[in-house]
Image (spheres, rainbow, N blue to C red):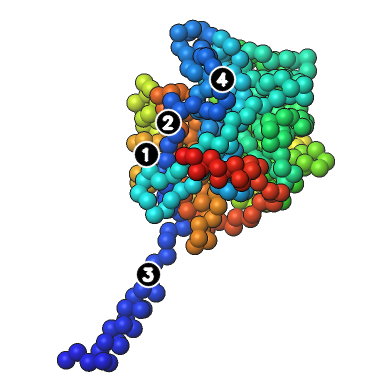
Amino acid sequence: MFTLRTCLVAVALAAVTLSAAPPPPAVSLIGKGAIPGTALDLSDLQGEICEAAAPNNCIPKSLLGGLGSALTYTGFDNVFMSAPDRGPFDGLTDVPYLDPIHFLYMLVDTVRPFPNIRTVLLDTRFLRNESGEHFVGAADGFSTSNPLATLCLDPEGIRVGPGGTFFLSDEYGPYLFEFDRQGQIERRLAMPPRVLIANPSEDATDELLLNLSGRQANRGMEGLAITPDGKYLVGLMQNALIQDAGLSGTDRLGVCSRLVKIDLATGRTNEYVYVLEAIDRGQGVNELMAINDHEFLVVDRDNRSYLKPGDPRAPTRKKIYKIDLDGATDVSGVARLPPSGADLAARNITPVTKTLYLDLLADEFGLKDTIPEKIEGLAWGPDLSDGRHVLYVMSDNDLNPLLDTQIYAFAVSNLNVKPSVLPGPMFPPGQVKKILRQQ
């Protein structure tokens, strides 16, 4: 017999069942999106840029690509900044590639099915030096007489500072530069001499043979982070320095990469060690982003992808680690690091602690068969309404019209993310709204 008491008991049990519903996972894929490889930027550049050694291999000068090489959130209005790296054809082009920055509106709609990340390009601006000259991605225009004055720039990391400027890490030097929001340089930051090379060359093999110390060819400062208080930049070398047992001939050997922490007020630097598990399959570290003042996320990946033309080999390493600088040894005074992480203890060196945070190839995400080779961009976005943080992960398509830029969004709830101190919008909110209305 169904009585009022029976009904009340049923309601109570239903309430208990609802309250006992499991919480969302600590990390979940909530968004996927893409920017077509054939999309154009807002530079209004006309004509084509061609590969120097293959003049028939050309792309539009205004091709929009490489966005995932360097990505950061401006802190307001879902507006992000992106800096492609040295451009197409490994920087070897018939005319110089002009280094741009892009302002991008990006928002994940958690209610819609994939693809559900909306992207709108807001503006394209060019990077310029103190005299107003363009920075270029050219791989053959180095100057050894005054390296800091170089116009050759290979951006690999971008972060917004508390003064309304932004910082770029460069792989060619490696160098660190500060720009205003229009792309005009404001400051060139000095780097520890040990990371620099004496004899740059457009030929990577020649460069390896010509240098006994400094960064490996094409393996400079790939990752850049800024602490949330805006006081420190932290840059991460993609692989071990040459003198840190980084090479055996021209083959990579060492697994101990250096992090460089720079005090923006004084210029003082500290160095720490990040240990890769391996360096085969082109493995290296490709991005660094702050969680708080001592914890960071690191992209550690191979260079394999089913999407890479002519390469059927499966990707096996597309990982994001959480690292902690607390307790790590400052190796600023250590001239040479050993080739293996196992040898650090004998030298009384403690590397940064690292734990696997996110494996992009995990079955639960279903990305393995379509994940691009170059996962290189990390950025926090605005938090979700339930308080979870949004982590954007973006690929660098090397300005290849045949490859789309891939974007993934993850909701995370198990990180102690500290908000960044930012002064205000880098892009006028009124212009954002106007552009979005026109879409």
* Mark found first going from the N terminus, 3 or 4: 3
- Residue 161 spot, x, y in % from top left: 70, 43
Examine the image and state in which quarter residue 313 appears: top left
Dot placed on the residue nearer the N-terminal end, 1 or 4? 4
Q: Which of the two marks, 3 or 1, is nearer to us in this view?
A: 3
Determine crowd level at label 4: few under 14, some 14-19, many 20+ residues with C-alpha closer than 10 A: few
Label 4 residue SS: loop
Q: Crowding at label 2, few (<14), some or many (≥20) Cα neighbours within 10 Å? A: some
For residue 368, which numbered disc appears in the image? 1
Compared with 411, 206 (above or below) is: above
Residue appearing at x 67%, y 13% in the figure? 141
Q: Earlier in the sequence, mark 3 or mark 1?
A: 3
- Give the CA distance from mark 1 to mark 2: 20 Å
Task: Determine the residue positioned at 38% across, 29% down.
Answer: 307
- Closest to the camera, between mark 3 and mark 4, is 4
Instruction: Tell me which amino acid carries mark 4.
Output: Leu
Of helix, strand and loop, which one carries label 2?
A: loop
Amino acid type, callout 2 = Pro
Which of marks 2 and 1 precedes in the sequence? 2
Q: Which mark is residue 21?
A: 3
Residue beneath disc 2: 36
**Where residue 107 sits: x, y (%)?**
49, 47
Q: Nearer the viewer, mark 3 or mark 2?
A: 2
Q: Is residue 354 visible?
A: no
